[in-house]
Image (cartoon, rainbow, N blue to C red):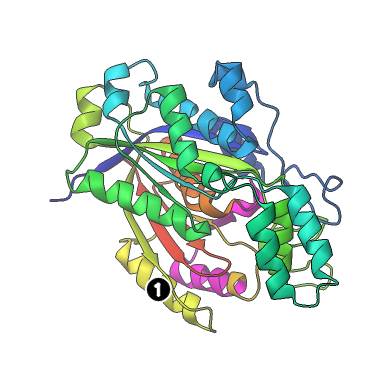
Amino acid sequence: MSRPVLVTGLGLVSCAGEGIEAHLAALEAGAAPRTDTQTFAPYCVHPAPSIAWDGQIPKRSDQRQMEAWQRLGVYAAGLALDSAGVKGDAALKQALHLVVAAGGGERDYAVDGAILTGLRDAADPGAYLNERLQNDLRPTLFLAQLSNLLAGNIAIVHGVTGASRTFMGEEAAGVDALRIAQARVAAGQIDAILVGGSYSAERPDVLVVHEMGGYLARAPYHPVFERGTRIDAPAGFILGSCAAFLMLESEAHAAARGAQALARLDRVASDRAPRIPGSVAHSLDVLWAQAGLASPDRVLSGASGVAPITAEEQDAIARLAPGADVRALGDVIGHGLEIVAPFGAALAAGLVAAGSAREVAVTTVGHRRGEGVLRLTQA
């Protein structure tokens, strides 16, 4: 059994603004996205827009107890529910399933700084690190900041109280969130599901983590596919604060409530290939076929800018979709890790709904591991 899976609601927030119209305009304009090059110099980030949180999170007490990544996610989820026309349908939301892809919350910066400083002079760095982690970290810090807290806040604020599951694990988490949500609706296990996630880039801890891995590009901004190709455009990604949620429904469920179908999410294919030369190209070849892609007129690439896999992905897309209009999501919203696939799917659905594309492919190649290819078509 395989039922058509329709996209009936979209909620988007990024440096480009909020809502699908703002993001389609930013995509088509092709201008450099808004950046902050001062706060975290020498690195830049694509910051979140100014948001009137009351529009989707009416209680100030709820706003205060959430960190930025949670507020972004809850806000975008509310936009998606509004877009789908179900914000006021308490009965539907009580049965609505939820899948969230997101990273963890903010760390204790003072403790992290003290540990990193102490490590410089520690006689036994390993023993020192273990002792400090055991004695200095608040025991509830990490447990309180898992991605399921975002799911919980969506349930509290918006009344989405069906079954939920959450994913962590960078770009691959977003792919699998969409893959499982789409498959469950297609298989007839459920009729409707809200899927997406959020990411806050404006955090010293995530910049430190990714700089230590050698993944960050330094300011100023350069387009994704130019990074690593010139000496003045270093390879790496520029993180972006963003959130994206999609309402997915079976065709029959959407028709029964008179919902407008924006696009059809046909297939989501995922893989986890080793980072050796040629592996990304081979993985995309396989995933392209699994997703059922024929000749997409638009391709939205989740390429990170990390070398050499970004160049390998670019070459593979040029071979798989000759003549297609190829755009990098990072040139619109920055890199959002877990949010790359949901954001790409939402933007692709917007393109189809606007009549700007017949078939859109979305690619996601993780900066370390994990690949995904999505196919969205006219409903």
Q: Is residue 168 magenta?
A: no
Does residue 296 show up? no
Which amino acid does the dot numbered 1 rest on?
Asp
Q: Where 60 falls versus 371 (above or below)?
A: above
- Secondary element at image label 1: helix
Q: Is residue 326 magenta?
A: yes
Q: Quadrant of the C terminus?
A: top left
The residue closer to the viewer here, 210 or 26, is 210
Q: Along the horizontal axis of the image, is 357 left or right of 335? A: left
* Residue 268 sits in quarter: bottom left
- Name the residue beneath numbered marker 1: 285
Does residue 273 show up? yes
Residue 243 rendering spot, x and y as whole percentages: 55, 40
Residue occupying image coordinates x 55% and y 57%: 302
Q: Which residues are magenta?
A: 311-335
Residue occupying image coordinates x 47% and y 67%: 370
The residue closer to the viewer here, 118 or 10, is 118
Q: Along the horizontal axis of the image, is 229 left or right of 161? A: right
The total of numbered circles placed on residues is 1
Mark 1 crowdedness (10 Å alpha carbons): few <14, some 14-19, many ≥20 = some
Residue occupying image coordinates x 77% and y 60%: 115
